[in-house]
Image: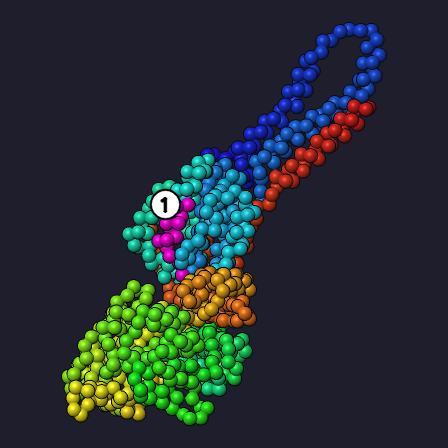
């Protein structure tokens, strides 16, 4: 549609409304018609009146013209007000709608955390919000806006066209950058759905424009070459104009704190704990003398300097001794970078007075060696508090008090015992099964394996007892975390002592059931798996020399492994691996839910979760058998989340939510390889260091209306004054 000449000089939101300006001719027409209404009749007395009027004719004519001009100006100014003029202070590149058209504008803002990259005084995400606000400010009256934040998953912030510009601007201003990546295919599907729904519900929106504000990060836009994304882009291009505003720049470098972990968990009071922070490079050059700071509960403790090779990583470590048991948080922080989201990483560290381990003995003497290995010192130096009981303790004791449970040569398990053990796993506990001469494999399989997947306890099915001579342990190249402590010590007695009898194990799911150690013949010796919130581990042989093959005379011990000096180290590693499962649940990635398991909690008991931004949301405890569960899913920001469990007395649990460093790679897709339907706007690249200021269209129609009212008042005053004279 061609714009009237005046619109080329001054922009109007609704140029068509200027047509009302022809109404300004009405006063002139009335004036001319009123002059033709009268007939001239000669009258003698009028001679004297005409003589008097001639003296004032010039003044009267000027007064009438003034009144006529004011009345015409009233109507002209009213037409201008209806056309909604605005003062253009800048243009969002390629986005302003053609004058007079009603357009559905879909604003799609990239929410991957690479958009936190700083360009001058503003991040790419802030620039995207400012440009999106400009699009709204410079729109035509009657345009509708929807808003999509690309993420994992994408979020329709405004799902149906909104016509109030102020509300749309407020929604844009309130957007917070999620600390995750973005799914391109899902975002395009969201846009398709919004466009289709708006076309049916708002047919008066004549055209559609989809505006993408993005840095073209490879982790998000690599999917553009997939058939699914190509198809969606093609379908959108058939019904909408597609505009891509490129906010990125080439050659961006970045370092990220990729990992923060404690060398060995659980952590106990009074014993040094070592923490490792891995710094990874996503740069095209070596980074030397980079400072890594360590904080404990917000207090800076130490700093280390690392050299990070191009494309590689470096590890900074520090040790700290906790004096108080309870909830603690360790943080590793990298010096300022252009991308700040991945420069910090947190670790939730529940510190215990000691690690509580229950040893269940199925036969006298079955736990003697593992109990000694768990707490090898008679004084207070041991970090493990081991308690030895008979198998009746499984049903009689409150198992959640223990961080790990060793079940040694227990003959069989019933349905009730299996249910209790499964609940213990769900709560994050660790189970270690040592087999032996009393074990009824069929009972184990029926109660702990051949059940519903949600009730399974063992990571492997038990087979027959193998009697194939002496077998020794194979560390399997020390690939499993249970054996890493033995790396570099191939002559360890752990791998030289013989095992004569063992139960053949068949891992349930090769994808999740991992073989930590094997025998010389390849049969699994130790199989473990994360089940529920905890970890289950089964050892194919016995934990003591009390387990014997009585079919021979003299009886033959199943294994001599417990006699090895390094058996102590193996048991300690088992305790650390199994008991640390509860701590693993405290550390998740952005987008993953944080969950808690409570024993004896009242149904619907409140749990208040405080997010890093200070907001607090309440969740309810849901009963699940003998335990209560709660979960919090809105973990879009990295940082520390505090959960206060309002039971008999408030209890604090702390959770660390960290970013997935996939998005730390700031490499970009080649803009020239994008589909032709995506009209790329590079205006922002011309001033990469300048912050783009959000321009709001000044509401000049309000001033025009005020002028109309002023002129109406002026016309009344002039008419009264001129008429009075």
Residue 376 percent location from the top left of the image: 38, 91
Frontmost residue, 301 versus 506 = 506
Q: Please tell me which residue is depicted at 42% across the width and 67% down the height of the picture.
A: 626
Frontmost residue, 61 versus 620 = 620
Q: Specify the quadrant of the image occupied by residue 196.
A: top left
Q: Is residue 653 above or below residue 471?
A: above
Q: Is residue 674 above or below residue 381?
A: above
The residue labelled by disc 1 is 236
Residue 268 percent location from the top left of the image: 46, 83
Residue 388 in view of the camera: yes
Relative to 336, 280 lies left or right: left
Q: Is residue 190 magenta?
A: yes
Frontmost residue, 161 versus 399 = 399
Q: Specify the quadrant of the image occupied by residue 368.
A: bottom left
Q: Please tell me which residue is depicted at 41% across the width and 42% down the height of the picture.
A: 197
Q: Is residue 217 magenta?
A: no
| Secondary structure, magenta segment, majority class | helix
Position of the C terminus by quadrant: top right
Residue 115 percent location from the top left of the image: 45, 61
Residue 284 in view of the camera: no
Residue 656 percent location from the top left of the image: 46, 70
Q: Please tell me which residue is depicted at 29% across the width and 70% down the height of the picture.
A: 448
Q: Please tell me which residue is depicted at 46% across the width and 74% down the height of the picture.
A: 348
Q: Which residues fall within the magenta stretch? A: 181-194
User: Badge 1 local density, few (<14 within 10 Å), some, or many (20+)?
Assistant: many
Relative to 522, 679 lies left or right: right
Q: Is residue 155 above or below residue 144?
A: below
């Amino acid at each position: 549609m061609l714009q009237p000449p005046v619109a080329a000089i001054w922009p109007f939101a609704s140029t068509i409304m200027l047509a009302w300006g022809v109404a300004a001719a009405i006063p002139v027409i009335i004036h001319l018609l009123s002059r033709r209404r009268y007939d001239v009749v000669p009258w003698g007395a009028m001679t004297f009146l005409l003589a008097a009027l001639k003296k004032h004719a010039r003044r009267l004519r000027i007064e009438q013209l003034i009144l006529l001009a004011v009345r015409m100006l009233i109507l002209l100014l009213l037409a201008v007000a209806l056309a909604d003029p605005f003062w253009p202070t800048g243009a969002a590149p390629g986005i302003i709608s053609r004058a007079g058209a009603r357009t559905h504008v879909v604003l799609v803002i990239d929410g991957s955390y690479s958009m936190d990259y700083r360009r001058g005084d503003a991040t790419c995400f802030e620039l995207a919000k400012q440009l999106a606000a400009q699009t709204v400010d410079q729109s035509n009256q009657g345009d509708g806006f929807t808003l999509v934040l690309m993420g994992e998953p994408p979020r329709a912030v405004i799902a149906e066209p909104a016509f109030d510009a102020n509300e749309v601007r407020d929604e844009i201003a309130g957007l917070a950058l999620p600390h995750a990546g973005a799914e391109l295919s899902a975002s395009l599907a969201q846009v398709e759905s919004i466009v289709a729904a708006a076309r049916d519900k708002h047919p008066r929106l004549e055209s559609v424009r989809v505006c993408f504000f993005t840095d073209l990060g490879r982790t998000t836009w690599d999917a553009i070459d997939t058939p699914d994304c190509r198809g969606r882009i093609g379908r959108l291009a058939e019904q909408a104009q597609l505009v891509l505003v490129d906010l990125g720049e080439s050659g961006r470098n970045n370092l990220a704190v990729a990992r923060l972990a404690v060398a060995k968990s659980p952590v106990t009071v009074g014993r040094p704990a070592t923490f490792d922070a891995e710094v990874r490079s996503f740069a095209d050059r070596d980074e030397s003398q980079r400072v890594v700071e360590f904080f404990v509960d917000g207090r800076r403790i130490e700093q280390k300097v690392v050299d990070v090779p191009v494309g590689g990583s470096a590890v900074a470590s520090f040790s700290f001794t906790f004096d108080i048991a309870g909830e603690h948080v360790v943080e590793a922080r990298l010096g300022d970078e252009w991308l700040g989201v991945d420069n910090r990483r947190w670790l939730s560290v529940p510190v215990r007075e000691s690690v509580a381990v229950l040893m269940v003995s199925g036969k006298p003497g079955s736990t003697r060696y593992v109990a000694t290995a768990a707490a090898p010192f008679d004084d207070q130096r041991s970090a493990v508090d081991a308690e030895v009981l008979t198998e009746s303790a499984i049903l009689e004791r409150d198992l959640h008090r223990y961080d790990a449970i060793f079940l040694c040569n227990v003959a069989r398990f019933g349905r009730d015992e299996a249910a209790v053990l499964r609940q213990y796993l769900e709560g994050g506990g660790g189970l270690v099964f040592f087999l032996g001469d009393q074990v009824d494999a069929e009972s184990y399989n029926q109660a702990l394996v051949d059940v519903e997947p949600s009730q399974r306890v063992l990571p492997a099915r038990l087979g027959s007892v193998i009697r194939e001579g002496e077998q020794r342990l194979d560390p399997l190249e020390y690939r499993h975390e249970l054996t890493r402590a033995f790396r570099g010590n191939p002559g360890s007695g752990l791998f030289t002592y013989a095992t004569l009898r063992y139960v053949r194990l068949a891992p349930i799911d090769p994808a999740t059931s991992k073989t930590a150690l094997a025998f010389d013949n390849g049969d699994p010796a130790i199989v473990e798996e994360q089940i529920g919130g905890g970890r289950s581990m089964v050892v194919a042989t016995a934990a003591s020399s009390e387990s014997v093959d009585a079919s021979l005379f003299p009886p033959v011990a199943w294994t001599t492994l417990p006699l090895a000096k390094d058996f102590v180290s193996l048991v300690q590693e088992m305790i650390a691996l199994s008991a640390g499962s509860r701590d693993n649940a405290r550390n998740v990635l952005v987008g993953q839910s944080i969950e808690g398991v409570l024993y004896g909690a009242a149904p619907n008991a409140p749990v208040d979760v405080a997010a890093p931004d200070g907001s607090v949301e309440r969740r309810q405890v849901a009963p699940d058998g003998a335990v209560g569960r709660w979960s919090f899913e809105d973990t879009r920001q990295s940082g520390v989340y505090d959960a206060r469990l309002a039971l008999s007395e408030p209890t604090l649990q702390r959770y660390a939510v960290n970013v997935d460093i996939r998005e730390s790679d700031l490499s970009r897709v080649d803009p020239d390889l994008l589909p032709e339907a995506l009209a790329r706007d590079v205006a922002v690249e011309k001033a990469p260091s300048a912050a783009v200021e959000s321009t709001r269209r000044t509401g000049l129609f309000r001033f025009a209306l005020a002028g109309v009212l002023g002129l109406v008042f002026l016309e009344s005053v002039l008419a009264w004054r001129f008429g009075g004279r």
